[in-house]
Amino acid sequence: AQLFGPIPGGLGISVVFVGALLAATTGIVGATVVAMGLISLPAMLRNNYSQSLATGTICASGTLGQIIPPSIALVLLGDIMSSAYQQAQLRMNIINTDTVSVGDLFIGAMMPGITLVMMYLAYVLLRAAWQPDTAPPAKMEKTDSTAAIKAVLPPLGLIVLVLGSIL
């Protein structure tokens, strides 16, 4: 909120950004939605956000954990896809040792995940521009963007290390 709060729709932008960070660090949807709901919803409603925009942004951002690597759903899907691919190759009498790996699925899911984040951000910004009363700027006494940036660096480092080692 310290980075984006002063602009219209800023809290919504923050929720989408944090949802993407949580998705990329945990890969679990339920925990992300609950945590963001408990933390973000009161702040958004306190700043006169529309209830539908606030809850929709939290729910949509919380479900990014299904597609943004390292997603638990992609890990499970990777095992199923690998087995199905091998069985299909054997039924066609093709001896091929290649499989669909979880790393391949992670690589394939990155662009759709980033695209979803960008679309959520665009929606919040457009809604704030067209209906300013649904997403007003947050009322903040003092903003400290350097502290906010320092708080975001460790999760970004964790994401780079985890995904870098997997890929």
Image: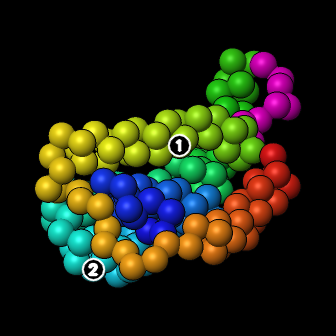
Foreground of the two, 53 or 64? 53
Question: Of tags 2 and 1, which is closer to the observer?
Answer: 2
The residue most toward the front is 142
Query: What segment is highlighted magenta in the picture?
Result: 94-101
Q: Which residue does the image show at 33% across and 44% down from the upper left?
A: 125
Q: Main secondary structure of the magenta part?
A: loop
| Quadrant housing the N terminus | bottom left
**What amino acid is labelled 1 in the image?**
Gly
Residue depicted at x 18% and y 50%: 132
Where is residue 110 shown, x and y percent of the image? 62, 40
Residue at image location 57% in from the left, 61% down from the top: 21
Residue 158 in the image: above or below residue 53: below
* Crowd tier of the residue under label 2, counting other residues whose Cα lies within 10 Å: few below 14, some 14–19, many 20 or above: some
Q: Nearer the viewer, residue 88 or 15?
A: 15
Name the kind of residue labelled 2 in the image: Pro
Secondary structure type for disc 1: helix
Mark 2 touches mark 1? (CB < 8 Å): no
Magenta stretch holds residue 95: yes
Q: Residue 135 vs residue 143: left or right? A: left
The residue under label 1 is 113
Q: For marks 2 and 1, give the CA distance.
A: 27 Å
The image shows residue 148 at horizontal and vertical percentages of: 59, 70
Disc 1 crowd rating (10 Å Cα; few below 14, some 14-19, many 20+) is: many
Instruction: Answer with the quarter of the image where residue 84 lies.
Output: top right
Mark 2 falls on what kind of element?
helix
Q: Which residue is mark 2?
A: 42
